[in-house]
Amino acid sequence: MKQLAKYSGEAYALLRIMTGLMFSFHGAQKILGILSDFQPAIGSQMWFGGIIELVGGLLVMVGLQTRWAAFLASGTMAVAYFQFHWKLQLGSHFFPAINEGELAVIYCFVFLSIACHGGGKWSLDKS
């Protein structure tokens, strides 16, 4: 619908803000134990992933160093999918619906798009 095109900047900003907010919550669960009983060992790969989720998500949400934060978050989610969901297994386990990796795949590509577009409206970046 052509009428919605004039709001594309605002819609993109809302996508960036909400994606960053939700991603940072995953990190808050891992690092701060918010609404979770699980906390990874400090210095473990999962702990570093939680730091990237928490800090990277907050940076993307406010639009500060957006491209770098989103690129790092995208890569983190690619690793999460390959290492923790797919595990390079043959057969149906490749598919995100089977290996429960849909969220990792979606985050990976949304963050890749944000890395390409930058902060946009309502961001602290000047891009």
Image: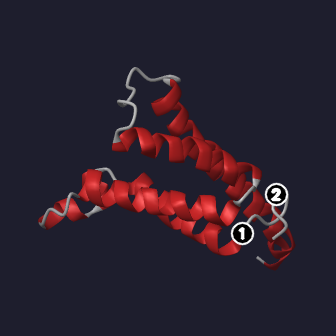
* Mark closest to the chain's N terminus, 1 or 2: 1
Q: Is residue 111 above or below residue 4?
A: above
Name the residue located 79 percent from the left edge and 66 percent from the top edge: 120
Q: How far is mark 1 from mark 2, CA to CA? A: 9 Å
Q: Which residue is mark 1?
A: 118
Q: Is residue 109 left or right of residue 120?
A: left
Q: Is residue 96 left or right of residue 57?
A: left
* Quadrant including the C terminus: bottom right
Q: Is residue 89 above or below residue 100?
A: below
Q: Residue 75 at what x, y percent from top left?
A: 45, 63
Q: Mark 2 falls on what kind of element? A: loop
Name the residue located 68 percent from the left edge and 57 percent from the top edge: 15
Inspect the image, locate mark 1, and give the three-letter code of the amino acid beneath it: Gly
Q: Residue furthest front?
A: 43
Q: Is residue 72 above or below residue 62?
A: below
Q: Is residue 121 left or right of residue 90?
A: right
Q: Residue furthest bottom?
A: 2
Q: Residue 82 at what x, y percent from top left?
A: 29, 60
Which label sits on residue 123?
Answer: 2
Q: Residue 84 at what x, y percent from top left?
A: 28, 50
Q: Mark 1 falls on what kind of element? A: loop
Image quadrant in which you'd find residue 6: bottom right
Q: Are marks 1 and 2 in contact (CB under 8 Å)?
A: yes
Which label sits on residue 86?
Answer: none
Q: Is residue 40 left or right of residue 109?
A: left
* Quadrant including the N terminus: bottom right
Q: Residues within 10 Å of mark 1 (few under 14, many from 20)?
A: many
Q: Residue 97 at what x, y percent from top left?
A: 31, 56
Inspect the image, locate mark 2, and give the three-letter code of the amino acid beneath it: Ser
